[in-house]
Image: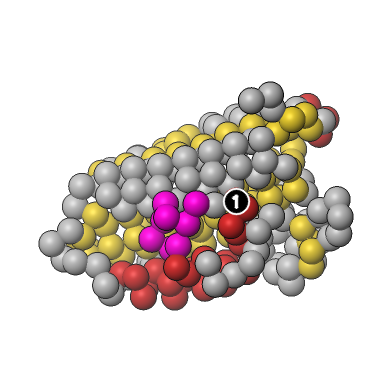
Amino acid sequence: MTITQLYDLTKTVAGDYLQQFTYPWEALAGIHDLILEIGETLSPDEYDHPSDGVWIHKTATVFPSAYIGSPCIIGRETEVRHCAFIRGSALIGEHCVVGNSTELKNVILFDYVQVPHYNYVGDSILGYRSHMGAGSITSNVKSDKTPVVVKNPDQPFETGLKKMGAMLGDYVEVGCNSVLNPGTVIGRRTNIYPTSCVRGTVPEDSIWKQDGVIIRKIR
C-alpha cells in the first residue's frame, strides 16, 4: 500500500513530491499547490498557458468541447477528447488519454494512463500505464459522509479524509462499469473484472473476480 510499492516515481513529474509521503492518500491535499508550483517552472517554448493555472503541452490534443479547469497541467502528446470535464487540480502526464465525458478532479495521472470512456476519477492517483475500462469510476465519498478508512487485512488505516477515491498501482487494469469504493488501493499489475464493486486493498499481481474473489496471477 505504500507509494514505493505501488508506483515507479520516474514516470511522473510529481515523483519528487510523492516520495515525501509513505501512503499515497497523504499526497491528495497538496495536489492543487503542486500543480501551480510545477506550472511556474514550465517553458513557454513547450507549454501553452491559455488561462491562469492551466498549462497544456504544445504536442497535446485538446478537443474544443473539453472543459479545462484550473489548476491543471496536461503533458506531452496527451489527448483530451470531446466533452471531457477537467474540474481542476488535475496533473495529467505524458501520452495519456482523457476520454469523452470523463470527469477528473484532484488527481495525479502518471504517464500513459488511460481513462478513455465515461469515467469519473476524483481524489485519486493512477499509476503508470493504468487503464480504466468504459464506465468505471472511483467513488470518493462514503454514503454516511464519515472519514474514509482503508481496509487492509492486517489493520485498517484511518485516513482522516472525507474524500478519497482509489489508488491504482502501475499497470492496473479496471474492467468496464466497475465501481472502486472510497479507500480502494489496487496493487501493481492487478486486473479487476468488469462490473465489479471493489473495496479495501487488492494485492499486486492479482485478479479480482466476481463476488470479491481474489486469485493470484500465474506469471
Residue 131 vertical position relative to residue 141 in the rendered view, above or below? above
The residues colored magenta run: 8-15
Frontmost residue, 56 versus 52: 56
- The amino acid sitting under disc 1 is Leu
Disc 1 is placed on an element classified as helix
Q: How far from the left and from the top, in percent, is residue 44?
A: 16, 66
Mark 1, other Cα within 10 Å: few <14 / some 14–19 / many ≥20: many
Q: Is residue 134 magenta?
A: no
Residue drawn where x is 70% and y is 69% of the image: 161
Residue 5 vertical position relative to residue 212 in the rendered view, above or below? below
Left or right of 99, for residue 28: right
Outermost residue, front direction? 219
Q: How far from the left and from the top, in percent, is residue 38?
A: 34, 70
Left or right of 25, for residue 159: right
- State the image quarter where residue 20 is shown: bottom right
Residue drawn where x is 54% and y is 52% of the image: 7
Frontmost residue, 129 versus 159: 129
Residue 13 can be seen, yes or no: yes
Residue drawn where x is 74% and y is 30% of the image: 216
Asked which colour scheme the image uses, the reply is secondary structure
Left or right of 15, for residue 171: right
- Please give the residue where the numbered disc 1 appears in the rendered image: 6
Q: How far from the left and from the top, in percent, is residue 49?
A: 22, 65
Quadrant of the snapshot with the N terminus: bottom right
Outermost residue, right direction? 154
Frontmost residue, 205 versus 133: 205
Left or right of 67, for residue 167: right
